[in-house]
Image (cartoon, rainbow, N blue to C red):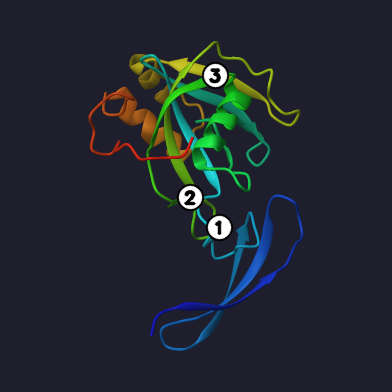
Amino acid sequence: MKNKVIKSEQITDNKWLNLFKLKFKDKKGKEHDWYTVARTTDVLNKEGPQVVVIIPFLEDKMVLIKQYRPTLDDYIIEHPAGIIDKGETPLESAKRELKEETGLETIDTICFSDMLYNSPGITNESLTYVIAKVKGEPHTSNNEDTEDIEVLVVDQKEAGELLKSGVKFSAKCWLILQAFSANICCFDCQSPLLQRKGLES
């Protein structure tokens, strides 16, 4: 017998994020409660990725954002990202979020990943990566009122310096920037990790 969720109860009713109480049965048949947060009522996340993370390359440089996060009450280095709206493909969402957060436009894209999970101990939030070759001049005039974003465009040397600067990073961004600074991750490189996938435009 495997562990299995047998019941879910929604505790809060907010627009973007809600608390759920799960009841699951362990492999010995004993029942337990588990609390989790989810972006949708699909608390077991069977509908596909909820968030897209974009890894943009402007020529041979990587685009990052420095964004204020109220949960930290501080600024953190991340890649552009956002919620995939209902009816959107990950690629459509990536193009929209990139434009909104950085002002840049997508020239070419590669789907980097299938569905991945951020912190499965507390949330079912899932994401997919999209690597993008981009063009334009970075700006933040399309940002929402709640967003406080600075666009950073760094080469490999600058990426290495940024990693040593003591600023806060998202875990996902830190790992990717480490690879970029070591010349492992780039848009045109032949890494087996970067397999082109047929996303709908």
- Indicate the quadrant where residue 18 lies: bottom right
The residue indicated by pointer 1 is 123
Q: Quadrant of residue 178?
A: top left
The residue sitting at 38% across, 15% down in the picture is 155
Question: For the residues marked 3 and 1, what is the alpha-carbon distance in whole angstroms?
Answer: 31 Å
Q: Which mark is residue 104?
A: 3
**Residue 200 appearing in the image:** yes
Asked if marks 3 and 1 touch (Cβ < 8 Å), the reply is: no
For this rendering, which residue is in front, 158 or 103?
103
CB of mark 1 within 8 Å of CB of mark 2? yes
The amino acid type found where label 2 is placed reads Asn
Q: Is residue 171 above or below residue 61?
A: below
The 10 Å Cα crowd at callout 3, few under 14, some 14 to 19, many 20 or more, is: many
| Residue 92 figure quarter | top right
Which of 57/47 is in front?
A: 47
Name the foreground residue: 134 vs 78: 134
- Mark 2 element type: loop
Residue bearing mark 2: 118
Q: Who comes first in sequence, dot 2 or dot 3?
A: 3
Identify the residue at image location x=55%, y=27%.
98
Mark 1 or mark 2: which comes first in sequence? Answer: 2
Q: Counting other residues with Cα less than 10 Å from the Cα at mark 1, is it few (<14), some (14-19), or many (20 or more)?
A: many
Closer to the chain start, of discs 3 and 1, is 3
Residue 23, image x, y percentages = 58, 78
Element type at mark 3:
loop
Contact check, label 2 and label 3, Cβ < 8 Å: no
Give neighbour class at mark 2: few <14, some 14-19, many 20+ (Cα, 10 Å). few
Quadrant containing the N terminus is bottom left
| Cα distance between the residues tagged 1 and 2 | 8 Å
Residue 45 percent coordinates (x, y):
54, 61
